[in-house]
Amino acid sequence: MVCEVKENYELKRHTSFKIGGCAKRAFFPTGVEEFTNLLTELDNPVILGNCSNVLISSQGIDGDVILTTKMNAFEVVNNTITAQCGVKVPMLAREAENRCLSGFEFMIGFPGSIGGAVYMNASAHSQAVSDTFKLCRAFDTETKKVVELNKDEMHFGYRKSILQEGRYILLDAKFELTPASAEEITAVMQRNLEFRKDRQPSLSTPNAGSIFRNPANDSAGRLLEKAGVKGLKQGGAQVWLGHANFIVNMEDATSTDVSMLMNKMYNEVKDKYTIKLEPEVKFIGIKSKEEDELWDTMLNKK
């Protein structure tokens, strides 16, 4: 089967921020074999999942992009769930609930996919991906081969995994969950959804989730709130009035608008508390000179 490909594909239709220019070519594999073939044949493609934790350049991406959204197969055997990297995590959380399996309750309100969740070791409400993770299949970009990585080899930490180092690209992952009553699982998921409703913008308001990671023993949201950044605006972007660690796309915001607003937030906390917040959102694509300088500052490269 020939993999679907689209030229000059507009990425903002695909991102939760509703920001992003075009990719020269966008590929849509439907399974592991198509995905690994593309990874073998293409020269340094950009891999994107559900695009919920990224800021795509308004100038686009100068190269090939692989979008894993059609890699949505999964399998449940007893207490084990194996899912391809493109499976959306809220759907998988509901599937676990239907099977009376506990461990995915925290993912019910996440907008992302399994690939992104494992990549960043997503966590919330005292649960994390690493709690249930058993092993995965990944593409090794150095050897061009498919390898298996177990939990120890993933080097999981707070919002971290070995996948962030660039050598390995997730294909699918296996999780071992714990049997529990449906009522108990449903109650926890409902509490999690209520919590998110009060503290995070809805997905109908374009955003990319938390903007900065929590520093050690503190909360980025608390620091930003105390620094008084709520409501700050830059072009079409605004710091959400409900929580200071979110930026919402109010009106055709560009990647430069968001980058400048992030830099203002970063500087307010740095100036008041001498704490350098680390971006959780990842910038992908062509950077303007201004964006390059802003991100070099926030990533402590200058």
Image: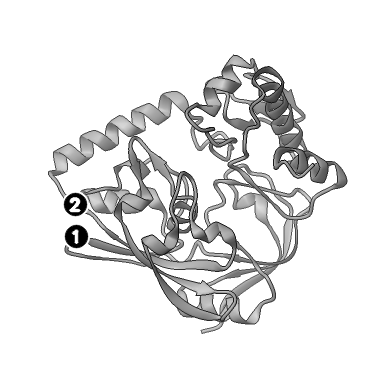
Q: How is the image coloured?
A: one colour
Image quadrant occupied by the C terminus: top right
Residue annotated with mark 1: 79
On the rendered structure, is 286 left or right of 204?
right
Question: Type of residue at label 1?
Answer: Asn
Which residue, given by chain and number where applicable, does mark 2 sit on? 178
Q: Residue at x 49, y 50 (%)?
A: 160
Mark 2–mark 1 CB contact (< 8 Å) = yes
- Which of the two residues, 30 or 142, is positioned nearer the viewer here? 142
Report crowding for label 2: few under 14, some 14 to 19, many 20 or more residues within 10 A (C-alpha).
Answer: some
Residue 177 image point, x, y percent = 23, 54
Q: Could you tell me which residue is drawn at 45 percent across and 75 percent down?
A: 32
Against 120, residue 163 (above or below) is below
Vertical position of residue 102 compared to residue 249: above or below:
below
Using the image as rendered, state which of residue 5 and residue 256 is in the foreground: 256
In the image, taking residue 216 as reference, residue 260 lies left or right, namely: right
Give neighbour class at mark 1: few <14, some 14-19, many 20+ (Cα, 10 Å): some
Residue 211, horizontal then vertical, whole percent: 59, 36
Q: CA distance from mark 2 to mark 1?
A: 7 Å
What numbered label is drawn on residue 238? none
Q: Secondary structure at mark 1?
A: loop
- Examine the image and state in which quarter residue 143 appears: bottom right
Note whether residue 236 is visible. Answer: no
The single residue placed furthest to the right in the displayed view is 289
